[in-house]
Image (cartoon, helix red, strand yellow):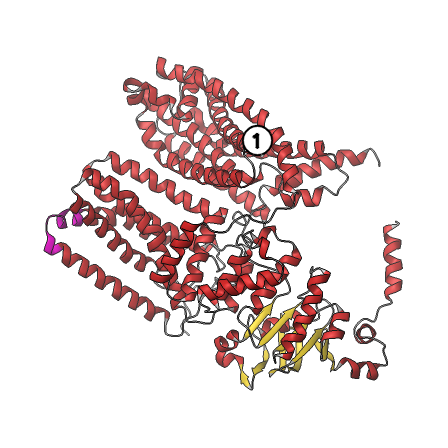
Amino acid sequence: MESDRPLGVFPALVRHFFSRFFDKESLSPQGDPEAGVIQTLGILAAPGAFFVLLFRPLSFTGWNLVGVRYLFVSFSMIVMGFILVFEWDALFPDRHDYQILTPQPLQSSTLFLAKTTALALFLGVFLVDVNFFGALFWPGIDDRPGVLSTLGSHLLAVLAGGLFSALALAALQGVLITMLRGNLYRRVSVALQTLLMGMLVMLLFLSPLAATHMRWMAEHHPQYLYYFPGFWFTGLYETLRPATHSAVLRGVGGFAWRALGCAAAVFLLTYLPGYRGHSRRALETPQPGAAGPGHVRACCDDLLRRAVLRHPVEYAVFHFITQTITRSMKHRLFLAVYGGFGAAMAVVSLASGHTGLFELPLTLSFILISGVRAAFNFPSELRANWAFQLTETAGIGPYMAAMRKWIVVCALVPLFVLLLPMELARFRWPVALFHFAFGLALSVVLMEALFLGFRKVPFTCAHFPGKVNLVFLSVMYVFGFTTYSGTMARVESWLEVRPVAAALFFAVAGLAWFMLARFGRSVLGPEAVLDYEDPADPVVRTLGIATR
Amino acid sequence: MLEIQHLTKYFRNIPVVDDVSFTVKPGEVTGYLGPNGSGKSTTVKIITALIEPSTGKVLLDGRDIRDDRIGFKRRLGYVPEEAILYSYLTGLEYLQLIGCLRRMPPREAERKANDLLELFSLHPHRHAPISTYSKGMKQRILISAALLHDPEVLILDEPLSGIDVTSALLFKHLLGELARRGKMILYISHVLEVVEKVCAQVIIIYRGKIMAADSVDHLRDLMDAPSLEGIFAQLVEHRDLEGVARDIVGVIGG
């Protein structure tokens, strides 16, 4: 009996730490981590399977084959990057773990080994999952003789790429936690996590573009191939199983091994000291927060209160939105996904010349408004919403006004102000200002249209992701990226040299906004109340064909 | 006056609150007692309009609260059983949020929040996120939030949970002061000594039904018990607790 005990403790700890990686509200809103794990594994395995089956009937050779290889290598790397960014705070045991496990008769070294083993297992499971179907059907795409060699080189390249991505990001966090302390670490870590999420999404959407331009880069700008690790591991693939005999690509491939070695070394050197420091700090009682908002923030707050947020409820909801967006990891990362997508669209727009420059602000504002709308639907600390329910002592007007004002002041205006220098660099200042006003006016009308019938305080209503209306979403996005930006960019270009027509446009936009707002109020009705519960699916779903 | 009339609430056809009626008078603290799962919190959620009763009604000054929910909420202050707060907000931000949602001008909400934080010894921690607060500190934030708008009706569900001795003493004085100012106070607690000292009348609920509703002195005489603990044990707890304790030690020892 006695000898059984130590054998059981370690697997139990590994299992505990492993399951903690999935113990997230965003992965399993209904509180079923196992279902969350299976869903996540299925979602991540699907793209590899889809693309390999899509490409399989075609036979690729030369640079075309290199391009397809790049897609699979970069997908493996980007997904492993996503996982590390998503689990950014779970690389080390958290305060909750320490509070439960420290009183138990366990050695610190046992905890460390169990956590490290769980982390390795976790990364291994995802690495295999993401690449399994791609590797299984790969020999059909590269149908040159030597199935085992084809399979082996493919596996080595995608696994090495994925491993590098995971180790490099873990090493980055190790360096941060070793070098920075307290608030500075938290601030830098949060900013980096958000930035990385945005960058990974951008790279994911730009992958096809990069894949089709690899030959051009190798022949004209070989230095570009050293800028992104996806090219290094595609180069590694080329050294293992040549498709083009490109010396540039093989040279880049040599770089991949060194990069993998460096990432592993930095990870090993920083993880243990980082773990020790983290475990010491995790249980320390936090000191009282030093200072409140600074002078600049207080001035902005005062200005907002006097000029924009006249009603106390507006003031409360406006600040609640800001505080949640900036402090909730789930919402920050969610918006970073939209930000990354917007950045990818910006790159594509800028690459497409003059028309793209007109379309860019409209595309970005469309992405921003739809991203914010989706983020507002996700609850944050849902059980705390009783505070809103109990204090709902005004009609829904001030709540909805605060939400719209937040979108304009904190999202749309900063976006167009950020784009203004680019406009000023390309156009004369009256034209640039016209573009600024045109984009902003159109975005406000679009916001009103997208928020028709919305009656929630952001982040306070239960949400069932499975109930998303895919037909509505598909129509909205197809309209957004095909018709809206393109058509409106042509209208903008036409109005630019016709001042009277431009003035008429602003009048029409104002009228459209007014009519939409009025229609929205009539849809909600005079006695509208805020929603806190997203009605669940009925136990028995009928076909809705009964006559009575 | 807050009147609870024949409240019944069914969950899956089982009555968790069964024909409950009592009154909370201005200037009095009314104790509401019962073991875990007896229906206390469900009653409170109905009174605070967080859930609907199956039957029965709640009247404030003779008017059904369902006729003017918003008017009722304006006059209500509530400390819930669990300290569920937005953990990423600081103590000051949370109180400002509640104050402004209660339609207080932002400046006034900030001033009152700071004053209450000072009086509840939380001022040094006002800029720290609530996630770093202890249970007692969170409870003091909840009490401050419930009092911020000077409500006429106060419903306090286990307000002393996790609170230190000094704060508990302060709270007992505070309850007396609030009662003297004519507030209607419904006080739910398991700490019978405190209930005995501060409540003018107590209501004891067990398995959804009211077992007793009277002043502590009168109940003492009626039940021939020396304390509220004795009354509670007679009405609610029928097990031999010493025997159960011996059984637990037996289980631990294998």
Span colored in magenta: A490-501
Say above or below: A359 vs A68: below
Q: Quadrant of the C terminus of chain A?
A: bottom left
Look at the image and say whether residue A496 sits in the magenta stretch. yes
Left or right: B29, with A244 as reference point: right
Q: Relative to the observer, which residue lies in front, A537 or A447? A: A447
Q: Indicate the position of residue A340 as horizontal and vertical percent values.
A: 38, 40
Which is the main secondary structure of the residues drawn in magenta?
Answer: helix
The picture places residue A126, in percent across and down from the top left corner, at 53, 34
Q: Residues within 10 Å of mark 1 (few under 14, many from 20)?
A: many
| Secondary structure found at label 1 | helix
Q: Residue A509 colored magenta?
A: no
Q: Residue at x 42, y 25 (%)?
A: A229
Examine the rendering and report whether any part of residue A351 can be seen.
yes
| Lateral position of residue A546 relative to residue A103, left or right | left
Q: Residue furthest bottom?
A: B62
Q: Chain of mark 1?
A: A
Which residue appears at 61% of the width and 67% of the height?
Answer: B79
Q: Along the line of sight, which residue is nearer the eye, A167 or A406?
A: A406
Against B157, is A115 above or below?
Answer: above
Residue A427's x, y, as percent? 17, 41
Amino acid at the residue labelled 1 = Thr
Residue hosting label 1: A178
User: Do we see residue A487 in this rendering?
Assistant: no
Q: Is residue B53 above or below residue A510?
A: below
